[in-house]
Image (cartoon, helix red, strand yellow):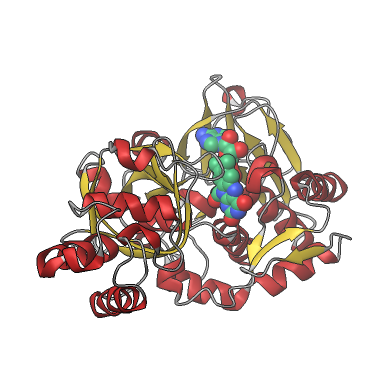
Amino acid sequence: MAGIIKVAVIGAGAAGCFCAVEMKRRRPEAEVAVYEAGRRPMAKLAVTGGGRCNITNTFEGAGSLAKVYPRGDKFMKRALKRFGPADLLHWFEAEGVRFVSQPDGCVFPKSQDAMQIVRTLEGLMRRLGVKVICGRRCIRIVPSAAGGIPDDNRGDAPATVGSGAAERFVLEFSDGGRETADKVVLAAGGSSTAFLRGLLPESVEIVPAVPSLFTFRIDDEGLRALMGTVIDNATMSIAGTAFRSEGALLITDWGVSGPATLKLSSYAARYLAERDYSAPLLVNWTGMTDAGAREWLGGAESAGPRRQLGSAHPPGLTGRLWEHLISRAGLRPEMRWPELGPKGRNRLVAVMTADQYRIAGRAAFKEEFVTCGGVSLSSVDLGTLECRSVPGLHFAGEVLDIDAITGGFNLQAAWSCAYLVACALA
Ligand SMILES: Cc1cc2nc3c(=O)[nH]c(=O)nc-3n(C[C@H](O)[C@H](O)[C@H](O)COP(=O)(O)OP(=O)(O)OC[C@H]3O[C@@H](n4cnc5c(N)ncnc54)[C@H](O)[C@@H]3O)c2cc1C
């Protein structure tokens, strides 16, 4: 039996299960075991995209990769060339899954059911003979150059076919058990820094983990009264920084949400964490420049100089939001244009293009959240995702310091990483 490779995958999420299947397909004689802390595999995948699974994105119109992947864009550029969205869709289509793309590039299974993806991967693992062992939390990965642990110290190894080959890792579990493996793939998803530090050898560099993809709390009664208002074309930024996002903004009973908010939370994830989620926020409600806003005001005035300020609002704004902005500028909606004066005009331009609020906290976005940080990309070979300081130890998915804005990009990162690792192991 010498020469049979024993691979332990830690974490039965999207990355771990995909990697196990691809690895086993390429090297059927390999013994692949997936250890999952939870009670069933792919529990998170089952709830992605609100249960519909936004599996990837066409990347058409997504802009630069740096805008999509605030962490890991350079790696993803390489990885997408080897296994991009089209490759992923072919992969699943060969298993009978069909897909639909939305105008915004988000791709979902035609069934609109994340469980179809889960069941496809589960079925493949079963057919190919991948062992999935649930309820086992790995707490330590110990490289073991000596070739494993004595037989009487072994836990319930899922298989011992690899005996004879030099086992290079000992895995310790929270239940006190141990397993051995020639190769280890850590695909444990977003994990706390402390947990990763305890799990991994000290030589592995870890970038401190903080949350990404969250909504902002804003303590402003006037704004909250507008709950439910959507502005399609807003720009948000954090004053004094280069963090800036564009897109739809939703006013909630808590503050602000929507794609522009989530993108900004992703770009500024670490900055905001360091400031305990307190920072000055600028909102351009109109998407206009300063000059554009003046031009619009001039046009509105000449269209009806005797009309009230509140009677016509800039495109994309609701009447109620416009009235809110007029009062934030210290004016009244019933004022007439000639009463505005140069100072009033300046204040109105300011609230239209750079309205100032304060981020006073964060709230989880229940549709999707990810971790910024994890195993540093400088610790791994970018072609194989193998740890530079611990040969035989690979990483895949969110456990790495790679994360994206919403839109199917996070799962694509998991699939691409998993594919690279499977190729490297095979
Ligand atoms: C509610 C929600 C919705 C989302 N929707 C989308 C979406 O539609 N599109 C998109 O692109 N992204 C989405 N994401 C993000 C996406 O789910 C993740 O980026 C992706 O699941 C990462 O895959 P992964 O395999 O790396 O990690 P995970 O899917 O998190 O899997 C890791 C697995 O490892 C297990 N594990 C952890 N530690 C251990 C341990 N020590 N021992 C054994 N097992 C362990 C965990 O229990 C888990 O099952 C969503 C996230 C959330 C929270």
State the residue in front, 251 or 129.
251
User: From this viewpoint, which residue is outermost toward the left?
Assistant: 343
Residue 69: horizontal and vertical position, in percent? 44, 65
- Observer-nearest residue: 329 or 228? 329
| Image-based side of 326 in relation to 311, left or right | left
Give the x, y percent position of residue 395.
51, 54
**For this view, does 121 lie left or right of residue 370?**
right
Residue 262, image x, y percentages: 43, 53
Q: Is residue 184 visible?
A: no
Ligand 1's quadrant is top right
Work out whether 112 lies above or below 135. Answer: below
- Vertical order, 170 against 355 (above or below): above
Circle count? 0
Quadrant of the rendered structure where residue 89 is? Answer: bottom right
Residue at point 28% right, 38% down?
A: 220
Which image quarter is the C terminus in?
bottom right
Answer yes or no: is residue 34 visible: yes
Position of residue 115 measured from the top left corner of the image (x, y, whole percent): 78, 43
